Image: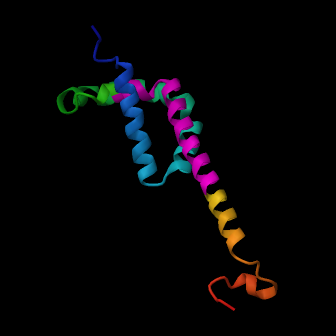
Amino acid sequence: MMSIWETPEEKQDEWIEKAFKMITEYEMDVPAVLLLESMKPLFWIGGQMSRVAAGPFMLAFWKDGFGLMHTFENKKNVEKLIKMLEAKNEKEREEKKRKKLKQASKEPEKKGWRKYFRFFNF
């Protein structure tokens, strides 16, 4: 039997996936990675402090709140979220490169001052 302080692996993966979807939905990948990397050492302390400050309210209003705290105070789970975000960014970067190369092969190179005015067809 698990206590309210522990969360099963499946539920932790679900929380990580929800966070990933929310971050990518609002296109906050880069700021999220920056924040997560810089705050990684403090997540455990923040989790413990939030249990003290929000614990009484959590039991009354939100049953899964402790699961969220338990999930993100574990550095392994934070690292998993960071890797997911970085993999998505890398995939998008490769896709942009491929698209740019494809477009460059279609379009003839403009010379002189015309290359700066891409919206005109001279």
- Residue 77 in the image: state x and y as whole percent: 48, 27
Residue 52 location (% of width, % of height)? 34, 24
- In the image, residue 116 sits, relative to residue 28, either above or below, namely below
Looking at the figure, which quarter contains the C terminus? bottom right
Q: Count the marks: how many?
A: 0
The quadrant of the rendering that contains the N terminus is top left
The extreme bottom residue here reads: 122
Name which residue lies at 58% across and 42% down: 86
Give me the residue at 37% from left, 39% from top: 18
Q: Position of residue 108 (x, y in %)?
A: 74, 78
The residue lying toward the viewer, choosing from 114 and 36, is 114
Q: Residue at x 35, y 18 (%)?
A: 8
In the rendering, at what x and y percent does residue 46 appear? Answer: 44, 30
Residue 26 visible? The answer is yes
Q: How has the structure been colored for display?
A: rainbow
Instruction: Judge whether residue 24 is colored magenta.
Output: no
Residue that appears at 66% across and 82% down: 118
Give residue 97's quadrant in the image: bottom right
What is the quadrant of residue 96 in the picture?
bottom right
Residue 71 located within the stretch drawn in magenta: yes
The vertical placement of 32 against 39, above or below, is below
Main secondary structure found in the magenta portion = helix
Which is more toward the observer, 75 or 14? 14
Q: Nearer the viewer, residue 99 or 71?
A: 99
Q: Is residue 4 left or right of residue 27?
A: left
Q: Give the residues in magenta.
A: 68-95
Query: Furthest-top residue in view?
Result: 1
